[in-house]
Image (spheres, rainbow, N blue to C red):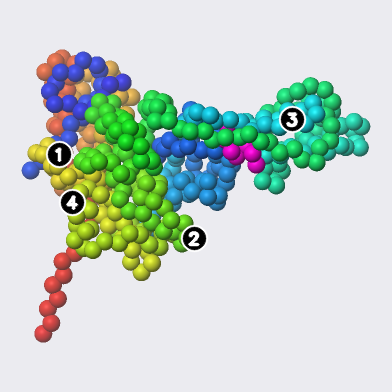
């Protein structure tokens, strides 16, 4: 299905084409946000595959460590949410391929055990083979990770064993007892920039709200920025990139984090690592929620600026934190847009507005594609059905305080220049959160 933005009515492919401008019978439902994607070099897990992770899942079989481990810090931060917004519901995790990556392995007697995945986590695995008195000539084979038994099987020969979440077994013949054989040789390898290009190809078919990049490679940054712009402008999927260290991105499609943070447990996160929380919180925030002054949970300090420096950061389109009474908060929920035009005005620098418009665009795209294109007649009655659906949808958005002062007259559904085309014009007034309060106190 084609989609994206339009300027003139010259599209060839059937699709839903949506244009935003700043203005001086089938129903539509408000969709949910909350999907993050990240390409993260790991020490365990499936390579070059998109894996869906939810907050309640056991991460150990997926990344080799549970959620409390420092190796899972990036997911801890992504799933935190804020004091006023929910965390994301899903992370589309991708482990990139790496040169020189290797699986840990060990051979004892007739048995060879090999880690299921490449990476140094495989070096934490041991295989213990214990002789049993019953059944006779049988053995208990235990797979142990960091001292914890993850799998146990009983057999007489290597052929009796089956692979588990941690190792595969090879060899032939009778088993023999060992007190513990550690796997060795596991290596994470080196991730090249080209692996991120493979990731972008793999993730394109998926729907997500925020893509996180926690690195500083300029080639990868450029590729991801181009990808996000194409997803919005050509594919019709409204999403944002959350990253740090880009050179003047100047687009509503990028949340540009420029603050490190220190956590209560003493962990210090660089500004590149702070994108984990910022990206997760941005995806979890709904179309009627703002992160301005929202608290970063368990963060206690950050790089502080003077008021003039904070003003400069905001004017440069940077997403920054400040600390107040041992609590870290977002200074202002903005994206990197700093150049404004007649069509894309200053209002688009606010991420709450972008989330609103992204929700509307993604909902109209998905539901029009599924229920309207090729189904509804392009005549007066058919266009009336389009309008009725849109009006009902926007009234739902207004009821949830996403827009204000909306009336059915703000929706136009007109015949297009060709027999199979329609033009939809919407006039919307977004609701923003109160960010500036001016008080006058008179004393007599």
Q: Position of residue 292 (x, y in %)?
A: 28, 55
Q: Residue at x 75, y 38 (%)?
A: 181
Q: Earlier in the sequence, mark 3 or mark 2?
A: 3
CB under 8 Å between discs 3 and 2? no
In 3D space, how far apart are the residues under numbered discs 2 and 4 (Cα atoms)?
A: 33 Å
The mark nearer the N terminus, 1 or 4, is 4
Q: In what element is the residue under mark 4?
A: helix
Q: Residue 254, image x and y in percent?
A: 27, 41
Q: State the residue position of label 4.
A: 315
Q: Disc 3 on helix, strand or loop?
A: strand
Residue behind mark 2: 265
Lower sequence index among marks 1 and 2: 2
Disc nearer the start of the sequence (4/3): 3
User: What number is the disc on residue 107?
Assistant: 3
Compared across the picture, whether 79 is left or right of 23 comes to: right
Disc on res. 344: 1
Residue 28 appears anywhere in the view: no
Q: Which residues are magenta?
A: 117-124
């Amino acid at each position: 299905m084609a989609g994206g933005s339009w300027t003139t009515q010259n599209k060839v492919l059937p699709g839903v084409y949506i244009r935003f401008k700043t203005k001086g019978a089938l129903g539509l439902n408000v969709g949910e946000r909350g999907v993050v994607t990240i390409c993260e070099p790991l020490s365990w897990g499936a390579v070059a595959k998109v894996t869906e992770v939810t907050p309640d899942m056991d991460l150990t079989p997926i990344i080799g460590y549970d959620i409390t481990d420092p190796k899972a810090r990036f997911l801890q931060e992504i799933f935190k949410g804020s004091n006023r917004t929910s965390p994301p519901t899903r992370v589309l995790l991708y482990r990139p391929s790496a040169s020189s990556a290797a699986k840990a392995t060990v051979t004892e007697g007739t048995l060879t055990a090999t880690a299921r995945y490449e990476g140094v986590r495989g070096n934490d695995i041991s295989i213990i083979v214990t002789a049993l008195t019953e059944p006779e000539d049988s053995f208990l084979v235990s797979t142990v990770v960091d001292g914890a038994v993850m799998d146990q099987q009983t057999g007489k020969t290597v052929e009796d064993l089956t692979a588990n979440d941690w190792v595969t077994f090879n060899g032939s013949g009778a088993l023999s007892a060992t007190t513990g054989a550690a796997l060795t040789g596991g290596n994470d390898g080196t991730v090249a920039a080209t692996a991120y290009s493979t990731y972008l190809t793999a993730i394109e078919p998926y729907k997500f709200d925020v893509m996180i990049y926690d690195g500083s490679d300029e080639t990868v940054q450029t590729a991801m920025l181009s990808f996000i712009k194409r997803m919005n402008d050509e594919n019709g999927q409204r999403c944002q990139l959350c990253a740090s260290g880009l050179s003047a991105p100047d687009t509503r499609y990028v949340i540009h984090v420029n603050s490190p943070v220190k956590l209560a447990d003493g962990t210090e996160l660089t500004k590149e690592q702070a994108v984990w929380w910022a990206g997760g919180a941005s995806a979890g925030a709904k179309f009627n929620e703002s992160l301005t002054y929202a608290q970063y949970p368990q963060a206690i300090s950050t790089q502080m600026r003077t008021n003039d420096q904070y003003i400069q950061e905001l004017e440069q389109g940077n997403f920054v934190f400040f600390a107040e009474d041992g609590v870290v908060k977002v200074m202002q929920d903005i994206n990197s847009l700093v150049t404004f035009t007649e069509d894309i005005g200053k209002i688009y620098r606010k991420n709450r507005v972008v989330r609103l418009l992204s929700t509307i665009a993604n909902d109209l795209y998905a539901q029009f594609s599924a229920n309207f294109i090729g189904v509804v007649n392009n005549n007066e009655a058919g266009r009336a059905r389009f309008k009725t659906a849109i009006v009902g949808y926007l009234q739902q958005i207004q009821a949830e305080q996403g827009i204000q002062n909306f009336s059915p007259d703000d929706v136009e559904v007109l015949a297009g220049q060709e027999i199979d085309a329609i033009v939809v014009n919407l006039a919307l007034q977004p609701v923003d959160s109160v960010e500036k309060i001016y008080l006058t106190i008179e004393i007599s």
